[in-house]
Image (cartoon, rainbow, N blue to C red):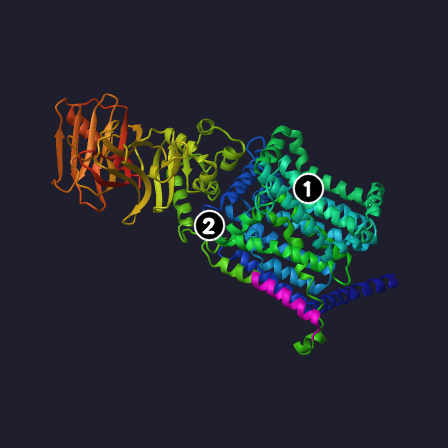
Amino acid sequence: MVDVATADQKHVKSAPAVSSNRLRRTLTWLSKVCKDRKFLALLGILALGAYLRLWNIHHLFNIFEDFDEGVYSLGARFISQGYLPYQDFTLCHPPLYDLVLASVYKIFGYGFFEGRYFSVALSVACIILIYLVGKKMYHPTAGIVAAALFAVSPDMVYFGRLAVQETLGIFLILLAIYFAIDFIQNKKRNRIFLCGLALGLAVATKYLFIPAAIAIILTIILLTMGERFWESLKTLGRPVLWLIYLCFASIFCSLLMILKWSMKLDVSIPFFEPLYWSVDDVAVTILIFLLPLVISLVILERNLPIKQWWFGLWGLRHNHGLRMLLAGSVLGFIFITGFFWAKAPQEFLSQTILLQQNRLGTTFPSLVEMIRYAPSAPASVIMDLLPVLFVIPLVFALLNKRGFSKSDCFLSMTLVVSFAFCQLFPTAPRYYVSAFPFLLLGISQFMPPLDTKMLASRFEMLSSSFKAGVLVVSSVSLIFMSVTIVQLTTWTGYDVFRVGFPSIDEHVYRETIDYLEGAGAKKIYADNPTFSALSPNLDSTLAFDTFALLWLEDRPPERIVRDMIDEGVDYVVLSPWLNIWGDPYKKEVPLAEEVRRNARLVKVIAPNPLFRVNIYMLGAKSEGVFNGDFDRWVEYKDKEIRLPLGWDPVLITGDGDRAVIEETYIAGEKCVGFIIYEDGLRDDKYDSTKAGIVQDILFPEIELKVQVFPTVNTVITGRALGPSIDFVDSHGHSLMVGFSDEVDGEELIRYGDGSRISIVKNAQLYQWSEHTIDLLAYWNQAGWQQPEKIRVCLVISTYYSQPGYYALYVAKVETEGAKAGTIK
């Protein structure tokens, strides 16, 4: 008993000592870590990266750029509520990001900015991860440089502050690179499986990361074939190879140009014209790009083990590591998408793959077009293109290193392959994002390991390689940092030189949401889903992805609006976002018209003439013509004329006469301009020259407000001049409202048959004036029956007997009054 008690006492007494030792060791370790300059540098980089991504994150909006955030936020929101993507709503990409974001909403509750914070956290984690990758591939200094480049890269900052898929995909690609390097260096088979798993998850995030996945898999295949295989790549960096290639490529390109011009062949010329996915262009690609390279390699065959490559590839069928890599990739993808393949196979296939085929761009862009485009491109696009320009010199530098290592081989091959496969996607800088981790790691390897003693000596004593490394990395870092800081000081955080409206986007979002919440909206549709996503109190239609509805699924506008009504949508928001996609696709015109036919405009938010958001009450009768009709201009009549949305042209000209309808600015107002020129000669076909637009509307029972800028003295009787606004019903009754500076107040003119009335209102010439028109009062005064519909015509005309140049400008036609108090 005594012995046991003594042992227990010793044990009790030793426990504090053990705890004290552990605490002492922990403090010693922390002290050592805090004194480590690399650790302190990494902390500073993390702080800088977090600051750049969090800066003003609640206030950086751009209605033209926020669409994707709204789509992903609403998709994740619906998933968190129990809806199934692909079946209950359209999802154009694989589901991993939306599933993860839905989990965030389940834990923290729904909020638009939770998605942004999630991206910030992922992006900061990417900084740590790329440091670890750089350290494993080369040395800690390379990791620090790679982390610094990632922290300040404009593209990484851009994606790291938005609720979009790219940041999650980049994190998974970096994770795959980490496991791949660990496998290459240490031959740990479980690492190759984890690498494949991360690649499968990245592809399940967005197909945009397929190029990076292919690049990593092909590079691992090469590195596992044997040292002589991957070292043979150095030959590809020899200048003599590319001199031979350029000679043959130039010859083949010249022959192609001669054949095209002499034999009228319908083929594209590389660099001068874009190459598309067609049989002819694929043949051109082989002829100009692939065949000269094969010939060049054959000429230098003595330096390339081509035969050994084939035998090495054949031997890969027994490579267990490669099987694990492919198995992990398939498992990672199926683990996320398998449920949807089983639950809704047709919908998943069509929405994520078949529909996306329509978005495939060129196989190789036109160099001439890119050069022409660059000076006028937004600053963000130009800065996105800069890293692409680093790829070729970076790869050549890697291939010509004295100690060409496996890490150099890994980066050089992944850079080339990933950027090449990125051409499968639309030709836009953001679609190169999957290759950016390789690019940043490649740049960081120029920095040799830092030696404390070397740093203590004077800079003149440093080796030339160290000087070159510092110069390259410092220059690139300075470019990235400068552009990032400039972008953060702009109104969007995305682009320096984009023409926009610095302070109104957030205001427009907020005013729209406040109005809809105040009006008691039950369910809304917005062409830009961010309007719906910003408010947790507004329920959105399940068909919220306008891009998918119009351009991928190509749904008829009638069906879209009918589905809205069936689903219970009571408010529709049409914003300037549609204008961005309108010119190239022309799809927004019928949708906006269909909404107007089935809804009443109840709110117009217009901070300035160029920025207008229209809110419609779906299912309510229209109350007349609205100023929003002048907001969108579209091409009609086989693109021969542009008109405001919903209006039809009235153009009558004779020989030598001219009639013009145009969008213009007069005295600070955006308006519709009507200009005519009458030469005074009688034409056999027309007695007069006219320019105007017409529209059929429901008869407005409240006053109309118009804003005009007349430039001629108007007398709208007989055969005289006639700048006017005409209203005609189906019974043949006509009210003509003209403007003159020769009347006091208002002058009414009746015609003998009783079917026409002219109203001349006082208006100063060559300046803007506003007028109200009470159609119901005029119809009652004339004793006419109130019609259901009426035709509105804005027109200027003159007869041949009064030649000259005349113009009328109209900036506003809308309802006003107590019943239309919501109209602004």
* Residue 474 lies in the magenta-colored region: yes
Q: Is residue 208 visible?
A: no
- Name the residue beneath numbered marker 1: 286
Q: Is residue 691 left or right of residue 35?
A: left
Number of the label disc, if any, that sits on residue 61: 2
Is residue 657 depicted above or below 301 in this figure? above
In front: 280, or 90? 280
* Dominant secondary-structure state across the stretch colored magenta: helix
Distance between the Cα atoms at labels 1 and 2? 44 Å
Tag 2 secondary structure: loop
Which quadrant would the N terminus be assigned to in this image? bottom right
Badge 1 element: helix
Of the 4 image quadrants, the one containing the C terminus is: top left
Q: Position of residue 416 (x, y in %)?
A: 68, 50
Q: Is residue 99 left or right of residue 21?
A: left
Residue range corresponding to the magenta coloring? 462-479
Q: Residues within 10 Å of mark 2 (few under 14, many from 20)?
A: many
